[in-house]
Amino acid sequence: MRNNFEQLNEPLLTLVYTLITGYKGQVNLPKSKITEFIEHFKQGKNYVTTSYDETYGLNPSHIADFRVVGLYQKEVSLYMTDEEKAKARIKPAQPEETEGDDKLLAAYNNKSAFYKIDCKCGAIYTVQLSAFTNTGKCNKCKETLYVDRARGKIDTYKGQGWLMTNKYVVDTQFNR
């Protein structure tokens, strides 16, 4: 680990991350620490670092997405594998917009949603997560839960939301 005096010679970049709960955070780190974080993220390992007087710990299984502010596109490609670079070069065909797409776009712009958790261990509660979440874990027993989108939105005490359960087999075709 490098000490704080060496960090003073490196420009700081901002790592902006979003947790699966929807919380957004940011950390100012030198480029070398950002590189370390990306390697840990790819390997699924927890990342702990000290930057100046603050210590940060990030768990990649709790991070929905992240971006680095301050890197040029050429530098970003340094962190990508050959497979990721090939995917970035392929541009998907853009579908023509229709009247029904307005509802889809409105749903896409709403980036969080409520989920009623109904676990076979007996836990029932409501959480707010990313609108694109398809699975989760029960806070009580840590069992995997699946979003039942085929059922449609249901009433929760926080408003309309999706049901996330493991009491029965959920048809995952509706979750795509």
Image: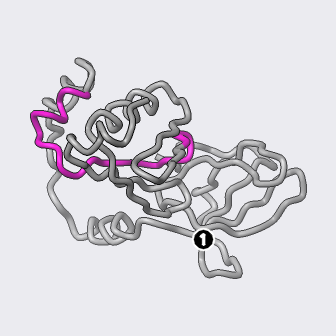
Using the rendered view, name the quadrant where residue 102 is placed. Answer: bottom left
State the residue in front, 125 or 175.
125
Task: Please give the residue where the numbered disc 1 appears in the rendered image.
Answer: 161
Crowding around mark 1 (Cα neighbors within 10 Å: few <14, some 14 to 19, many 20+) is many
Residue name at image x 65 percent, y 72 percent: 154
Residue 161 highlighted magenta (yes or no): no
Q: Please, which colouring scheme is shown?
A: one colour
User: Magenta residues, as a range?
Assistant: 59-79
Q: Is residue 17 above or below residue 8?
A: below
**Number of dots carrying numbers:** 1
**Image coordinates for residue 47, horizontal then vertical, percent:** 51, 36
Up the image or down, 36 lies above or below 65; here it is above
Q: Is residue 55 left or right of residue 168?
A: left
Q: Which residue in the rendered view is the most extreme toward the top?
A: 82
Residue 169 falls left or right of residue 109: right
Q: Residue at x 53, y 52 (%)?
A: 133
Q: Is residue 65 covered in magenta? A: yes
The image shows residue 156 at horizontal and vertical percentages of: 69, 77
What x and y, as percent, mark residue 113? Answer: 53, 68
Residue drawn at (56%, 60%) of the image: 21
Say what secondary structure mark 1 lies in: strand
Residue closer to the observer: 68 or 120: 68
Give the residue at the far right of this rendering: 122
Q: Is residue 111 left or right of residue 105?
A: right
Residue 65 drawn at (x, y percent): 40, 48
Q: Tell me which residue sits at (71%, 81%) in the image.
A: 157
The residue under label 1 is which amino acid type? Gly
